[in-house]
Image: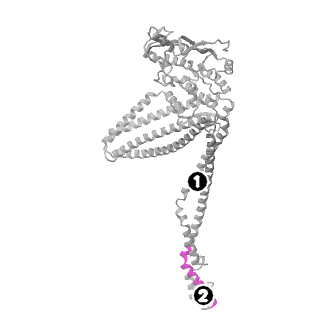
Amino acid sequence: MMIKELTMHHFRQFYGTQTINFAYENDQMVTVILGENGRGKTGLYRAVLYAMFGDRFLEQDDQGKGLLLANSKALQEDAESEHKGVETYVQITFSHEGKTYTLYRSQIARKKANKVDEAAFDLHLYDYASGVKITKKEEIDAFIYGILDERVKHYFFFDGERIERLTRTNQEQKLEISQGIRNLLKIDQAIKSRDVLKHLLKKTTKELQKNSTGEYKKALKQRDEISKEEEKVKEEIASLVNLIDHSTSRLEEIDFTLQRFEKEKELIQRRSQLESQMSQIQERVQEAKEAFTSFHSTMSLLLAKDVLLEVKKQLDLYLGEDRQEDTMSSKGIEELLHDLTCICGRDFQENSPEYVRLQALYNAVQNQEANQNYHHLRAEIMQLNGFLQEKETELQQHLNTVKKEEQKLEEVTHQLERLNQQLSGSSESKLMDLNKEREKLTEEKSTAQYQLQQWRDKLSELDAESKKLDLKIRDLKVKSGVHQQLIKKEETLSSSIGAMNKMIDTFEKDVIEDLEMASTQNLEYLLDESGQAMLKEVKVNEDYSLEVLNCFGQAFLANISQGQRQVLSLSFITALAQVAGGTRTLEMPLFMDTPFGRLSSKHQENLMSFIPQITSQWVLLVTDREYDEEAKRKFEQLGYIGRYYRLESTEAGVTQIREQQLERGGRI
């Protein structure tokens, strides 16, 4: 589909009948529409969606807050004259698959006191090839939805705010990406069917509980209670994740604002370093403290060390110089004395010197044998004391580490307090307020992260308990007296839900892979040379947050510049449009409102040459600030511009569309 012409009558800021002819032929397929904020740039895309789908609101609108499609000046003129009502219409002429069509949609608006009523009036589609005019809404909707699925229509229009949302690593980014993935899946009926099956499973489980008895009924009730508790825990986790994301986003905004104060910049950087250092020290302290758990089994023995030393001392006094050595037994020596024969076989006389020495040896061995248990006890005490000495040394080392690191932590904390005082004592009152808010947010975020981990641990415990209970229920099913038809129904529903979850997960993975691949290719094209060397791959995390990997495969989003973030966002946005369009070259007009933002000149130039390669029609909505003379000159040189318009405010609430002349070759 390519839009040829858009005509609006009393639509939003466009008083009277005004027309835009869009560029769509050959290489000159870019239409530039320049206007300051509030002049109606977004209103042009609103007109396209209104004509095609009857949409009154865009995604970014605060729906239900009094948004009017009718022009305010025309409404006031009608109220002051005949009061017949104002017909507001949009007529769009477009081509699709070689055929041309005109779609017309209108409404009647009437002003009553301070209230305006708007009601649908006329709708028709004209086919130039057949000359047929279709007036039935159902037939027109079926035709339009066949060209562009309603679920993905928003991926052909991106404003600056939406581009900016994707540069933030917070819940807004995750919601944007997850919503995009869900829309691109196009399996609404499967999801609805799964929800119906879940409802039936819940009813069947309740029926099982009602008709069950004994342990089986008790187990089913317990599983139901665990399931309810899991839901509550998941709600707590979601709430804390939102809080952490909000805090993180706000902290990023505060740091960005703080960094604009040049004279405080060095202090801010120093604070960031100290906070990182504090985190590392806290980790080391925690590791040292966790090491104490290995001393639980020996702690009581360490307390008894003095007692053991005293026992050894008493044993030493009692045993004296007595040594437990390998000698003959007293029985063997007694036999030698009885036989009056030396161990070498020589005879000796009773009371001879040999006899006396042998008798002394006999007495010594007898004494040693009598004290054998004491020797063993002393040896064991000495061995235990050696072990405890090692443990005591090891424990002292850990204690020294904790003491040393806690001392460092105290020093860093003191330095941080001094830095915060310096920053808070700044002459700028805003800086002071920002620092106070930052301290509060940091504390809230830290507390929330701790609570989040506790709830996640709780969820893991519940999950383990649930799986254990499922095994028990499976065994009890056979033994229970419950009607087998109910059991079979529950099993069938459970397996069906599991199969559908697997199918949805598979589709989601496929869509994510397509998005990652397209985003990575787009990023490579849009980045400058230094960015291409560093940033290599776009990833969508499990929580739907956007990430970019560096050349070493490491997560690197937190380290890239604001300009690179903008390029990453545009890469992902164009990937969404590509995946939604289903082809390498989009056969849909791609609307972009203020896309250049914080882009460097090189990134702007890359974007200008890249988009025309992936879409058959590009409508570029820009302001004077971002589409300055330098940007305009570069775009002119590329030769893609076919039409150029300026939106000018002629009076309050009225915008006039004025076409600007182009030089040959698409140059203005």
User: Where is residue 420 drawn, in percent x and y?
Assistant: 61, 42
Q: Is residue 118 above or below residue 549?
A: above
**Residue situated in front as seen by the camera: 652 or 348:** 652
Which residue does the image show at 61% across and 28% down from the upper left?
522
Residues packed near mark 2 inside 10 Å, few (<14), some (14 to 19) or many (20 plus) = some
Which residue does the image show at 58% across and 82% down from the upper left?
364
Which residue does the image show at 49% across and 39% down from the upper left?
240
Mark 1 vs mark 2: which is more N-terminal?
1
On the question of residue 612 being in view, the answer is: yes
**In this rendering, the label closer to the viewer, 1 or 2:** 1
Residues packed near mark 1 inside 10 Å, few (<14), some (14 to 19) or many (20 plus) = many
Magenta residues span 352-376
Mark 1 and mark 2: Cα distance apart in space: 68 Å
Q: Quadrant of residue 251?
A: top right
Q: Is mark 2 on a helix, strand or loop?
A: loop
Q: Mark 1 points at which residue?
A: 288
- Residue type (three-letter) at the residue carrying disc 1: Ala
**Residue situated in front as seen by the camera: 403 or 266:** 266
- Residue type (three-letter) at the residue carrying disc 2: Thr
**Residue situated in front as seen by the camera: 49 or 520:** 49
Q: Mark 2 points at which residue?
A: 341
Asked if the magenta segment contains residue 83, the reply would be no
User: Where is residue 231 drawn, in percent x and y?
Assistant: 43, 39
User: Where is residue 472 drawn, in percent x and y?
Assistant: 39, 47
Asked if the magenta segment contains residue 358, the reply would be yes
On the question of residue 27 being in view, the answer is: no
Q: In this view, does 167 lie above or below 116?
A: below
User: Where is residue 553 drawn, in percent x and y?
Assistant: 62, 38
